[in-house]
Amino acid sequence: MSQIDDIKNKLDVVEVIREYVPLKAVGANFQAPCPFHNEKTPSFVVSPDKQIWHCFGCGKGGDIFSFIMERDGMSFPEAKRYLADKAGIVLEYENKETYNKRNRLLDILELSTKYFEHCLKSNIGEKARNYLHKRGLSDDEIKYWRLGYSPDSWNSLHNFLKARPLQGQKYTDEEIFAAGLLSKKEGSSSRYYDRFRDRIMFPINNTNGKVVAFTARISPEKEADSKMGKYINSPQTELYDKSRLLFALDKAKGDIKDLDSAIVVEGQMDAISCHNHDIRNVVASSGTSLTKDQVNILKRYSNRVALVFDMDDAGQLAADRGIKECLSSGMEVKIITLPSGKDPDESLKNNPDELNRGVEMAISKNEDDFEEHYSKSIENAKSVLEYNFEKLSQGLDLDILENKKKVRDGMFEMISYISDKTEQGFWLRKISEDLDFAEVDVREEFLRRYPGGNKVEKNYNNTKSGYNKSSFNSEEGNAINNEKVRKVKTREEKLTELFLSILLKQSSLIEYSNKNIEANVLIGSEYKKFYNILIIHYNKSGSFQYEDLKVELEKEGFSQDILRELSLLAEKEYYDLDPNDLKKQLMDIIIELKKFNRQHQTKKIYKEIEEAEKN
């Protein structure tokens, strides 16, 4: 038995999905509105018996692995590790020593978070607590974000952790240091002291919500005199790589998927303020420009992003770098400017409607009007190229040729990062009009500088998730690409599917169907072949199990999509019918399918007669 099977055996698909979706028992199965598309009538079905799920609206489905991959935007290896942790299984590629080491580091960071939380609530954290209250945070919001305070001491956290765990092997200096919580005294290999002292602590979580690092803000009364930075972060550790994490993503990922848009701000307080004002699809880059890895992580949840960076020089530089990373990854980018404040936190205090309007425009999709979608300035949310044009031309007299060329060259560089040729063409035409250049000259000059039309080689998968799901086979959790176009089915196709689904629900009816309808009456060569395999399999054993039939179908080259969808279709449509009523339903379907077949045969005969008369 593979480790994938071990994980499936230990985790129930209903319980895993129920953490994300409010499931309602319907017969032997569960139903809910699909979490992957908007719908009024529930078409999302989960089978505890078969341990599968399927949505009859968007066509997505699979097992617990494919659900976690789709809902949380994980790759298969990430979903495997997440579910293995949930099931308490050590993966084969992680030896127990490495697995235990990683878990002990996570435990140390979790204990440290609780310690900092306790200190903030105590007398020693009063000034830090007052500061957070002045910043507009309530006690409930402080608790939700698990904010804390590190005492003004060289060893308070160190001593606390050295006495833990209360049972079992105590944490060593080396482990606490490896978690990024201690520093070493220069010239000594054994003298450790607390890395964070007299600071407000912001826990940084991974996408699964586990604390892996901290950002620490200096105590407000020391801010003016301190030689240390206003904010310091945990060093890079086995668990924490700053370039691969986004603050608040664990809390924002669901809203990013639901709204199909991510808002990126610079600082943790910016992100916290946005969430506290019910703008919940917000993450923070933690004071740096977006990295390629961070952009790829965002692409798992949405291909659309809006950047809200500080109005100072450093913020604008970070915005420019982030823009280029997003464009070169094929993302749709917008910029939200904040005239009422230098950052989102300040803007929300001065004029909360300003950021709300910008966010509304950033997440809207005005695809009916190309020009409005890409260029028109509405409130303070702008497309990235419009923002760039305004910034480049600010303070310049565009009647002067040199200034025009300067703006043109700056626009060329940004346009070169766009992968979509249609959008490139729109902007080249737009800047030729705005700068009063001939469009043909602008296009020729652009292609002379960027012969391929792009500054950087594009190497990305043009999907929202950022990875090719179809690269995972059935041995890897049935994580297949279900994002197919859902064509409108004919009445015959629907009847064929219902016919087969009833046989899968009640296999005793296969004998009756075999005597009363032949495979060629069904619509679709794939379904005809499916029916024949079903009869052969039933005749061999007198019944069938879902997993056994799945193996037979895989041998014949069938996708697991077909069996999963057909197996759950009858459960959805006929869950309340007893065996006799189900047989009556089958008989009615057979009659109607035969009627369609006779019509086809009649048309075929007429056509043959017409051909014969012509000859």
Image (cartoon, grey):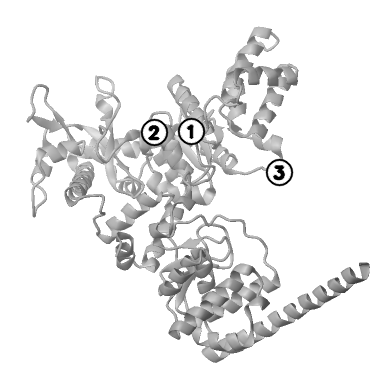
Quadrant of the frame with the C terminus: bottom right
- Residue 313 in the image: state x and y as whole percent: 46, 19
- Do labels 3 and 1 touch, CB within 8 Å? no
Please give left or right for residue 295 compared with residue 133 in the image. right
- Do labels 1 and 2 touch, CB within 8 Å? no
Q: Secondary structure at mark 3?
A: loop
* Residue 392 picture quarter: top right
Q: Secondary structure at mark 2?
A: loop
- Foreground residue among 328 and 166: 328
Nearer the camera: disc 1 or disc 2: 2
Amino acid at pointer 2: Gly
Upstream in the sequence, badge 2 or badge 3? 2
Amino acid at pointer 1: Ser
* Residue 420 picture quarter: top right
Q: Residue drawn 33% across and 60% down?
A: 4
Nearer the camera: disc 3 or disc 1: 3
Q: Secondary structure at mark 1?
A: helix
Q: Residue 267 — which label?
A: 2
Q: Residue drawn 56% across and 66% down?
A: 56
Spatial CA span between label 3 and label 1: 31 Å
Upstream in the sequence, badge 3 or badge 1? 1
Height in image: 347 above or below 110?
Answer: above
Spatial CA span between label 2 and label 3: 35 Å
Residue occupied by mark 3: 368
Height in image: 19 above or below 242?
Answer: below
Residue occupied by mark 1: 347
Amino acid at pointer 3: Asp
Height in image: 583 above or below 401?
Answer: below
- Residue 402 in the image: state x and y as whole percent: 64, 8
- Foreground residue among 283 and 615: 615
